[in-house]
Image (cartoon, helix red, strand yellow):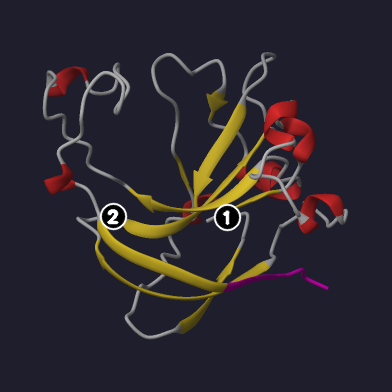
Amino acid sequence: MYLITNLGNFPKETRQSRLCENNRFASGGYSRNLTHAKLTVRLRGELDAQGAQLLLLVQGTAGKVTANYVSSAYVLSAQPIKITPDWSEQSLTLTPDPSQWTCIGARHNLTQVYGNGDIAKLLADVDFDLIFVLFPINVVPLNADPSKRDQLWVGRDYTADPAYLPNGLLMFDTVTIDYPE
């Protein structure tokens, strides 16, 4: 479950794909300043999370860490979303308090792309996307040296052992964003 907030940061092929079709947020010119915004979700599910939690991931280019193009990706780790079998409505507040967030960093070969920016600057202009993710996930290789799992691509270079991965179903009904006044 995701929301692209700025179509301009994606390749033309992506912008013209079904991924971006009918994106009312981006085409409607909604504010990407999500500082102190309240995000409310209505969802249900049954999940064997294997230690992961359902979290909001925020990505954008604000708060670059070098002169190079670097984006930041943070999960709102202090406000996990509970997954229950019955429909529930839960709200998150996108506070710029760094203690609420965890930077997910980058693969060894993507450090020129992803860095550890300033969460306050990122929330002031979320110019990539919002994604609901299960985090952290323990990816254990079935057919590769486990010590090299972070240098290899799961699904291409090795198969992940499904016994360690989350398993189940999540269903989202609505997601709303309320901006602060």
Question: Is residue 159 visible in this depiction of the protein?
Answer: yes
Left or right side of 141 for 128: right
**Residue appearing at x 33%, y 79% in the figure:** 84
Q: Name the residue type under label 2.
A: Ala
The stretch drawn in magenta includes residue 63: no
Q: Disc 2 marks which residue?
A: 52
Q: In the rendering, which numbered label is found on residue 76? A: none
Question: Is residue 62 visible in this depiction of the protein?
Answer: no
How would you classify the magenta stretch by its main secondary structure?
strand
Q: Which x, y percent locates residue 139?
A: 22, 37
Q: Tell me which corner region of the image, top left, top right, bottom left or bottom right, holds residue 31.
A: bottom right
Position of residue 176 relative to residue 94, above or below, is below
Q: Which x, y percent locates residue 34?
A: 72, 57
Q: Disc 1 marks which residue?
A: 97
Q: Name the residue type under label 1.
A: Asp
How many marks overall? 2
Left or right side of 119 for 80: left
**Residue appearing at x 66%, y 27% in the figure:** 64
The local secondary structure at tag 2 comes to loop
Position of residue 21 relative to residue 73, above or below, is below
Left or right side of 130 for 127: right
Q: Which x, y percent locates residue 152?
A: 29, 18
**Residue appearing at x 75%, y 48% in the figure:** 124
Disc with the residue nearer the chain's start (2 vs 1) = 2
Q: Quadrant of the C terminus?
A: bottom right
The local secondary structure at tag 1 comes to loop
Which stretch appears magenta? Answer: 174-181
**Residue appearing at x 39%, y 60% in the figure:** 54
**169 and 106: which is toward the camera:** 169
Q: Tell me which corner region of the image, top left, top right, bottom left or bottom right, holds residue 10.
A: top right
Position of residue 142 relative to residue 74, above or below, is above
The stretch drawn in magenta includes residue 175: yes
